[in-house]
Image: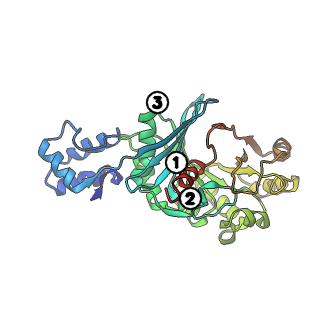
């Protein structure tokens, strides 16, 4: 059956014409889906015959809450969603003074192999569809009973390894007849897939590109991020400079602080030299402990931040949220996998 929620409004309108319905029905269905409708039966402004016809040809994705963890410290909510094929993904709702941010996954699992990340331990299972990414925003919003103002694609998976579906999701979530979340309220994180960065630059989207850097030198980065062997850090920064030249958008560099690995002064100095010539923001991330990882949180975050700032680099320390739940990306899914003795 056809995944109707992954269609754009224009495609949905054409599809309704194809089955002999007036074009305005497409907009009606689009609106219902983007409000979180889980079946055609509840679409009260459609005839019974049309609802039955749609049910025979099209499917509506809708995840089920497998687990929900709520932080007693700050109200962060972590969801483990079960998809229609039985796979599970994670979504996190984070509450800030400026509004609610939802962190969504783009794949079931991940093949990038970053040594400090729980998401990649079991590898990649499959890409998420545009509708499955949209559902994470829709059903988090419905479950929480609160509006979502910002989206970050920083959950399980590498967004630029699923680029076509991610771009379709961005078009859907940005649509004025849908959730209408503007591109400037969306951040997309990549571990450094250079062809994807260059493709994004050509599109000149107004989103925020976040690059998971985690080390400014190839020796260290290859040790903790296998993607560096395909797209090394020299070429990565060349791509970042091209991105800025094309878009004029400042890049955020994510940097998980790992004790004794990437937290030395010379590495801060090297980051500053590599960023020179474009505006850049370095977001220092206190490392979450992952049981399977030998890496531990750095004790030099403050010193590293000051070293970057001495070079005129804007550096902030990410506020840790959900410290009393499975906060690190992939941990909740991994725990469920262990308990069930197989894939989730």
- How far apart are the alpha carbons under marks 1 and 3? 19 Å
Q: Which residue is mark 1?
A: 90
User: Could you say which disc has been placed on residue 146 in the image?
Assistant: 3
Q: Position of residue 79 (x, y in %)?
A: 51, 42
Task: Give the number of the mark in front: 2 or 1.
Answer: 1
Question: Who is closer to the viewer here, 31 or 221?
Answer: 221
The reply, left or right, for residue 335 in relation to residue 14 is right
Q: Position of residue 58 (x, y in %)?
A: 25, 54
Work out which residue is located at the far top of the displayed protein and give it.
97
Measuring 65% from the left and 36% from the top, which residue is drawn there?
324
Vertical relation: 297 (above or below) 223 = above
* Residue 191 visible, this angle: yes
Question: Who is closer to the viewer here, 218 or 128?
Answer: 128
Q: Position of residue 205 (x, y in %)?
A: 51, 51
The reply, left or right, for residue 118 in relation to residue 186 is right
- How far apart are the alpha carbons under marks 2 and 3? 27 Å
* Of callouts 1 and 3, the N-terminal one: 1
Measuring 44% from the left and 30% from the top, which residue is drawn there?
145
How many neighbours does mark 1 have within 10 angstroms: few (below 14), some (14-19), or many (20 or more)? many
Q: Which residue is mark 2?
A: 158
**Which corner quadrant of the image does residue 226 belong to?**
bottom right
Mark 1 residue element? strand
How many neighbours does mark 2 have within 10 angstroms: few (below 14), some (14-19), or many (20 or more)? many
Mark 2 residue element? loop
Measuring 72% from the left and 50% from the top, which residue is drawn there?
256
Q: Position of residue 98 (x, y in %)?
A: 58, 30
The reply, left or right, for residue 324 in relation to residue 133 is right
């Amino acid at each position: 059956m056809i995944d109707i929620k992954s269609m754009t409004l224009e495609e949905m309108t054409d599809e309704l014409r194809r089955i002999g319905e007036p074009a305005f029905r497409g907009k009606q269905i689009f609106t219902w889906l983007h409000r979180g409708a889980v079946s055609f039966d509840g679409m009260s402004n459609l005839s019974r015959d049309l609802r039955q016809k749609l049910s025979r040809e099209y499917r509506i994705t809708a995840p089920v809450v497998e687990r929900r963890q709520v932080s007693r410290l700050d109200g962060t909510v972590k969801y483990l969603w079960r998809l229609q094929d039985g796979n599970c993904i994670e979504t996190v709702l984070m509450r800030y003074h400026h509004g609610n941010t939802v962190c969504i996954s783009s794949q079931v699992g991940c093949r990038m192999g970053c040594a400090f990340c729980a998401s990649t331990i079991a590898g990649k299972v499959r890409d998420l569809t545009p509708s499955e990414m949209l559902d994470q925003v829709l059903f988090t919003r419905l479950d929480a009973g609160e509006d979502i103002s910002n989206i970050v694609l920083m959950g399980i998976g590498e967004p630029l390894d699923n680029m076509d579906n991610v771009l379709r999701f961005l078009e859907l979530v940005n649509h004025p007849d849908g959730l209408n979340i503007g591109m400037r309220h969306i951040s997309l994180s990549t571990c450094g897939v250079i062809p994807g960065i260059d493709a994004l630059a050509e599109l000149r989207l107004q989103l925020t590109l976040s690059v998971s850097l985690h080390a400014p030198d190839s020796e260290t980065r290859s040790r903790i991020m296998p993607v560096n062997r395909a797209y090394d850090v020299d070429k990565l920064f060349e791509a970042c400079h091209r991105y800025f030249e094309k878009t004029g958008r400042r890049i955020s560099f994510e940097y998980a602080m790992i004790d004794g690995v990437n937290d030395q002064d010379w590495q801060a100095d090297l980051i500053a030299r590599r960023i020179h010539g474009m505006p850049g923001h370095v977001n220092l991330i206190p490392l979450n402990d992952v049981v399977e990882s030998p890496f531990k949180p750095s004790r030099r975050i403050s010193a590293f931040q000051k070293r970057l700032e001495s070079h005129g680099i804007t550096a902030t320390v990410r506020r840790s949220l959900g410290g009393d739940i499975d906060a690190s990306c992939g941990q909740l899914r991994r725990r469920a996998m262990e308990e069930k003795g197989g894939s989730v």
